[in-house]
């Protein structure tokens, strides 16, 4: 007796079979996937096509959502870029950075440290961003191939958030580079899922590069 594999192979190799024997479509009955009595093969094909259509519609809606989210982030990055380009001095650049991160990106806590610059030691007395960091942390930032996202594992970095440090549950760390690493930008959230290890880091990478380029002008 011909087995199922042979039947399937025959139909695959003869795609015109049902066109030449269309009367079989109304005679062959198959199981109804939604229960009840058996239905004609042609009706089952319609149901299958409807399921595929729903699946494709769902994927399309998902792609549209991702596209809209990416457009929104791109717009925020553009506004931050314009603000940083318009900054006339270091203080204005830092203010623009913190303001946009807080108000536009909804990041409640942001801090950074810079350990290179011709007058870093002098600035450290009045600008917290130039306060010294440990050699271990500076080396860690230098070795970061991409932004770190996850729970706050560094008590030193957590201290940068001041009184808010006890509420921070997840962080994103981005090295600031300009012909070498010269600083670290830290973002903190009280939401443990805001920055998580498996998340995409393309925009965070760009944020670190943008911040580094903007601040390098004033070092």
Image (cartoon, rainbow, N blue to C red):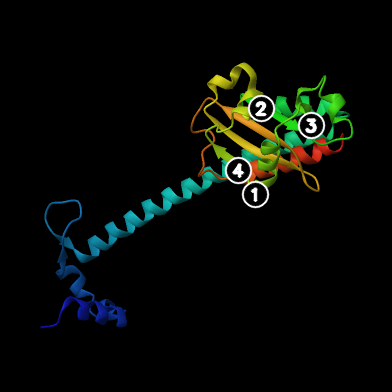
Q: Could you say which disc has been placed on residue 83 in the image?
A: 3
Q: Residues within 10 Å of mark 2 (few under 14, many from 20)?
A: some
Percent x, y of residue 16:
31, 80
**Are discs 2 and 1 less than 8 Å apart at CB?**
no
Question: Is residue 132 positioned above or below 203 on the image?
Answer: above
Q: Nearer the viewer, mark 3 or mark 2?
A: 2
- Can residue 106 be seen in the rendering of this structure? no
Pick whichever, 95 or 39, lies toward us: 95
Q: Which residue carries the number 2 mark?
A: 110
Q: Which residue carries the number 4 mark?
A: 70
Q: Which residue carries the number 1 mark?
A: 145
**Are discs 3 and 2 less than 8 Å apart at CB?**
no
Query: CA–CA distance between discs 2 and 1?
Result: 21 Å
Q: Quadrant of the N terminus?
A: bottom left
Query: CA–CA distance between discs 3 and 4?
Result: 20 Å
Side (left or right) of 82 relative to 150: right
Query: CA–CA distance between discs 1 and 4?
Result: 23 Å
Pick whichever, 91 or 173, lies toward us: 173
Q: Secondary structure at mark 3?
A: helix
**Are discs 1 and 4 less than 8 Å apart at CB?**
no
Question: Is residue 201 positioned above or below 127 on the image?
Answer: below
**Are discs 4 and 2 less than 8 Å apart at CB?**
no
Who comes first in sequence, dot 3 or dot 2?
Answer: 3
Side (left or right) of 164 relative to 58: right
Q: Nearer the viewer, mark 4 or mark 2?
A: 2
Who comes first in sequence, dot 4 or dot 2?
Answer: 4
Q: Secondary structure at mark 1?
A: loop
Pick whichever, 56 or 204, lies toward us: 204
Side (left or right) of 9 relative to 207: left
């Amino acid at each position: 007796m011909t087995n199922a594999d042979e039947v399937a192979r025959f139909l695959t190799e003869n795609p015109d079979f049902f066109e030449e024997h269309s009367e079989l479509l109304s005679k062959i009955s198959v199981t109804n996937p939604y229960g009840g009595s058996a239905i004609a093969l042609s009706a089952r094909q319609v149901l299958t096509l409807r399921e595929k259509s729903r699946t494709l519609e769902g994927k399309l809606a998902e792609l549209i959502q991702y596209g809209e989210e990416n457009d929104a982030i791109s717009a925020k990055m553009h506004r931050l870029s314009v603000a940083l380009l318009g900054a006339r001095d270091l203080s204005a650049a830092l203010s623009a950075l913190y303001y946009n991160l807080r108000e536009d990106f909804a990041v409640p806590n942001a801090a950074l440290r810079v350990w290179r610059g011709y007058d870093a030691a002098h600035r450290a007395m009045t600008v917290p961003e130039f306060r010294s960091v440990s050699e271990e942390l500076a080396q860690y930032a230098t070795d970061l191939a991409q932004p770190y996202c996850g729970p706050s594992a560094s008590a030193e970095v957590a201290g940068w958030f001041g009184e808010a440090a006890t509420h921070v549950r997840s962080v994103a760390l981005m090295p600031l580079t300009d012909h070498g690493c010269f600083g670290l930008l830290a973002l903190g959230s009280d939401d443990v899922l805001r920055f998580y290890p498996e998340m995409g880091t393309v925009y965070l990478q760009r944020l670190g590069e943008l911040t580094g380029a903007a601040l390098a002008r004033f070092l």
